[in-house]
């Protein structure tokens, strides 16, 4: 529950005059800015446990939170500590105020980075304590730092729809990081068609529904499953028709292109688009007015749309399948979403998000079951169905939990059943994917990982395979 009537101040303790800085901040916030703090969350390092409480007004709740920071000048250590300990604590604190002045410069920087990334509640305010050497007086000023980032965009959407499993803003995989950054960069460009590539089950449609609509600042999204357009009425469905255009056309029909006016036309799995429609769509892609003719009409219409396409095929396959003119017009900006097996650093978080989305029975545990067997599977299984594989495993685990009432037993039973199902078998992925070089890299990495697991370290693994440990380390880094 959001505590809206409990204004909270978050601040580090400073080695010198820490309590005095806090006391002055509370006084100036109330007197000069009419901000009456009712809770203080005071962040301290382990060596400061014996600090006395500052002299603050009655009625203000004062809490200390010790963070395991050994080097207060190391940005990454501070960032991770705040991520793990502070953010879960303040997620429901509103309004939240942060005094960024106390602490080291690295601590100041982390506050700014997290704020720019949208990590805090949307109405969070940053403050800076100041001391005037001339007047010998203190004050506190509001920090104007309106920078927005792709992390903030992802977090805003996640907060709007917490029930949906979405890509985490704080991912670890470099490939996912690169893909989402590219999506943020390209989707904000108005008037430019966007092509999103990725395997089935990777979440392309979800990304379009959540992130792309927001980035393109268009509320309306008209999805067009291109495989459903293979019929005699496909022209009418897409372009519309006028009354009397053909038998059965008893009234005018706007069509999806016109229906998408002032929104986004999403051509899902564009490789399934029938050839006759491909040629007709070239005109729509040709200029920013997106002109087209309804069936039976001799007049062109215009529609104000953004065009987004998606496909589970590789780019070179699309080039062979689609009309060359059409392909050239929508393939300028391409974002390729990597499969889960190339983002193994994020799999446990993906698993938790899928569990959260599918968990509708409150008797089920909040935390997604996880054990050594699952962690090993996450490091070795190709997961050809991507998120759908995780969804299937989650449903199986929930089903077994109803019977066994114990997370680890339910997960083990679900894993055994999950791995027997042919639908998730990696039979067609036995040698990786792509061209010869792609598959060789795929194989070398898995050979290196296997040898390391068998032998326990790189030196023994290299001796076992009669190669250098550098060779194995290099192979393990490649995907």
Image (spheres, grey):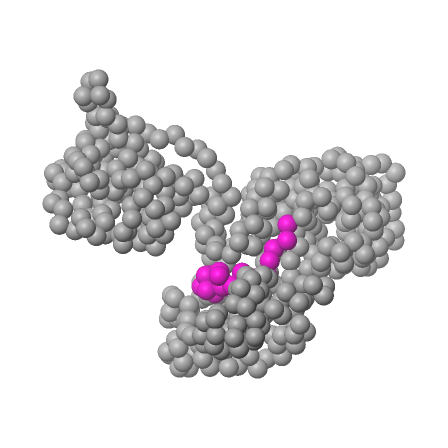
Q: Is residue 27 above or below residue 201?
A: above
Which residues are drawn in magenta?
Answer: 335-354
Along the line of sight, the residue nearer the viewer: 477 or 126: 477
Which residue appears at 38% of the width and 69% of the height? Answer: 365
Along the line of sight, the residue nearer the viewer: 101 or 61: 101
User: Where's residue 47, x and y in %?
Assistant: 19, 50
* Residue 406 visible at all: yes
User: Where's residue 115, x and y in %?
Assistant: 39, 40
User: Where's residue 417, x and y in %?
Assistant: 53, 81
Q: How many numbered badges does the structure rendering display? A: 0
Q: Is residue 166 above or below residue 100?
A: below
Which residue appears at 64% of the width and 36% of the height? Answer: 190
Question: Is 69 situated left or right of 243 in this image?
Answer: left
Along the line of sight, the residue nearer the viewer: 161 or 442: 442
Q: Is residue 460 above or below residue 354?
A: below
Question: Is 214 situated left or right of 103 in this image?
Answer: right
Res 272 → quadrant: bottom right
* Quarter of the rendering occupied by the C terminus: bottom right
Which residue appears at 78% of the width and 54% of the height? Answer: 319
């Amino acid at each position: 529950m959001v505590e809206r009537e409990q204004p909270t101040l978050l601040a580090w303790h400073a080695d010198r005059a820490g309590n005095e800085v806090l006391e002055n901040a509370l006084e100036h916030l109330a007197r000069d800015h009419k901000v009456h703090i009712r809770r203080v969350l005071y962040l301290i390092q382990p060596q400061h446990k014996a600090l006395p409480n500052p002299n603050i007004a009655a009625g203000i709740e004062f809490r200390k939170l010790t963070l395991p920071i050994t080097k207060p000048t190391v940005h990454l250590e501070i960032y991770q500590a705040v991520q793990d300990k502070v953010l879960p604590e303040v997620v429901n604190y509103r309004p939240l105020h942060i005094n960024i002045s106390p602490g080291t410069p690295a601590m100041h920087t982390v506050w700014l980075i997290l704020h720019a990334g949208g990590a805090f509640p949307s109405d969070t305010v940053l403050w800076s304590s100041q001391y005037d050497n001339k007047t010998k007086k203190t004050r506190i000023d509001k920090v104007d730092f309106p920078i927005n980032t792709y992390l903030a965009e992802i977090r805003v959407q996640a907060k709007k729809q917490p029930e949906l499993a979405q890509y985490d803003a704080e991912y670890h995989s470099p490939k996912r990081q690169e893909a989402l950054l590219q999506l943020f960069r390209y989707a904000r460009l108005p008037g430019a068609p966007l092509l999103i590539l990725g395997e089935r089950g990777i979440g392309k449609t979800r990304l379009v529904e959540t992130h792309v609509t927001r980035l393109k600042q268009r509320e309306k999204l008209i999805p067009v499953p291109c495989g459903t357009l293979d019929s005699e009425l496909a022209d009418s469905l897409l372009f519309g028709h006028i009354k009397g255009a053909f038998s059965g056309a008893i009234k005018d029909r706007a069509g999806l292109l016109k229906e998408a006016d002032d929104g986004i036309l999403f051509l899902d799995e564009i490789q399934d688009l029938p050839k006759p429609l491909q040629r007709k769509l070239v005109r729509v892609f040709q200029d920013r007015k997106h002109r087209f003719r309804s069936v039976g009409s001799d007049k062109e219409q215009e529609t104000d749309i953004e065009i987004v396409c998606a496909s589970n095929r590789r780019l070179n396959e699309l080039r062979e399948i689609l009309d060359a003119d059409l392909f050239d017009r929508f393939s300028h900006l391409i974002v390729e979403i990597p499969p889960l097996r190339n983002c193994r650093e994020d799999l446990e978080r993906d698993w938790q998000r899928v569990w959260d989305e599918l968990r509708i029975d409150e008797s089920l545990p909040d935390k997604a079951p996880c054990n050594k067997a699952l962690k090993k599977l996450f490091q070795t299984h190709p997961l050809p169905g991507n998120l759908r594989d995780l969804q299937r495993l989650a449903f199986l685990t929930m089903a077994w939990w109803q019977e066994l009432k114990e997370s680890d037993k339910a997960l083990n039973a679900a894993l055994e059943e999950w791995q027997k199902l042919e639908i998730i078998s990696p039979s067609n992925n036995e040698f990786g994917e792509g061209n010869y070089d792609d598959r060789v890299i795929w194989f070398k990495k898995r050979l290196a990982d296997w040898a390391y697991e068998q032998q326990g370290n790189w030196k023994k693994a290299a001796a076992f395979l009669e190669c250098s440990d550098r060779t194995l380390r290099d192979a393990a880094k490649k995907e």
